[in-house]
Amino acid sequence: MVETHHPFRHFIIKASLIVCAMLLGGQVFSQKIEVEKKIRQEQFPAGALQWLEMEYPGLRRDRYFQEFEADTTNYEAKFCWEKAWYSIEFLKDGSLKDIERQMDFSDIPEAGRQKMEQQLDADFKKWKVSRCQEQVRPKQPGKRYEIEIKGRDATGAVKYEYLFNENGGLEQKREIILPSNFINQY
C-alpha cells in the first residue's frame, strides 16, 4: 500500500505545534503561516473578477492565488496597473477584503515613517524593509502600511510582518514562518 500525503501536511503540523505551545506555555504571540497556491483565472470567484475588470481596466501581468492561513481561505489577485503593483484580496464569497499597493518605504509620510523606524530600531539590532505596501479596506477610514522586515535580533536572523496605521502606530506584528516546502509563491 502506497501512503499519500496531504499537500498541506507540513502546514497543519506547524500550525498544531504553535497552538499547543500557546496553550501550554501561556505565551501570547503572533505568527504568520500562510500558503498561497497559484490558480487559473477560471477558478477565481466570478464576482471578484467582474469587480477587478470594472475598477482596474487594462490590468497587466495578472496572477491569481488561493490563500490558506489557519482556518481561513481567501483569494488574491496580483497585477500591474498604471505602473504600480497591486495585491487585492477577496473573501471566499468574492467580496473585497483589502487593496494593497506596493510602494517604497521612503514614500510614507515622514511623521508616520519616523514613528515606524523608532519601533523597528527598538525591535532589531539591524533591519531592512523587504516589502512595503499601502493598504486600504472597504468601509474603513484611513490607510495602513504592511511592511515586511528582514532583521537581526537577539535570536539571529528573523523575518516579520508589521502593520502600522497611517500615523505610524503599531497595529500588528507577526513573525513570518515559511512552510518547510516553500509553497509560498510571491
Image: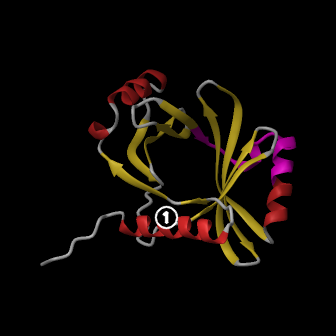
- Which residue is denoted by mark 1 in the rendering? 15
Question: Could you tell me which residue is drawn at 47 percent across and 27 percent down?
Answer: 56
In the image, is 128 to the left or to the right of 169? left
How many numbered tags mark residues here?
1
Question: Could you tell me which residue is drawn at 72 percent across and 63 percent down?
Answer: 128
Question: Could you tell me which residue is drawn at 48 percent across and 23 percent down?
Answer: 55
Label 1, residues with CA under 10 Å away: few <14, some 14-19, many ≥20: some
102 or 42, nearer to the observer: 42
Instruction: Look at the numbered disc 1 and give the secondary structure of its residue.
Output: helix
Residue 19 is drawn in which quadrant?
Answer: bottom right
Judged from this view, the residue extending furthest toward the left is: 1
Q: Is residue 35 above or below residue 9?
A: above
174 or 25, nearer to the observer: 25
Check the image and tell me how it is coloured.
Answer: secondary structure
Residue 32 is drawn in which quadrant?
Answer: bottom right
In the image, is 117 to the left or to the right of 129? right
Question: Could you tell me which residue is drawn at 45 percent across and 51 percent down?
Answer: 71
Q: Position of residue 47 (x, y in %)?
A: 37, 26
Q: Is residue 116 above or below residue 159?
A: above
The question of residue 22 being in magenta is answered with no
Quadrant in which the N terminus is drawn? bottom left
- Residue range in magenta is 100-116
65 or 57, nearer to the observer: 65
Q: Position of residue 182 (x, y in %)?
A: 44, 67
Check disc 1 and give the amino acid type: Ala
Q: Position of residue 93 (x, y in %)?
A: 39, 32
Q: Position of residue 84 (x, y in %)?
A: 56, 39
25 or 162, nearer to the observer: 25
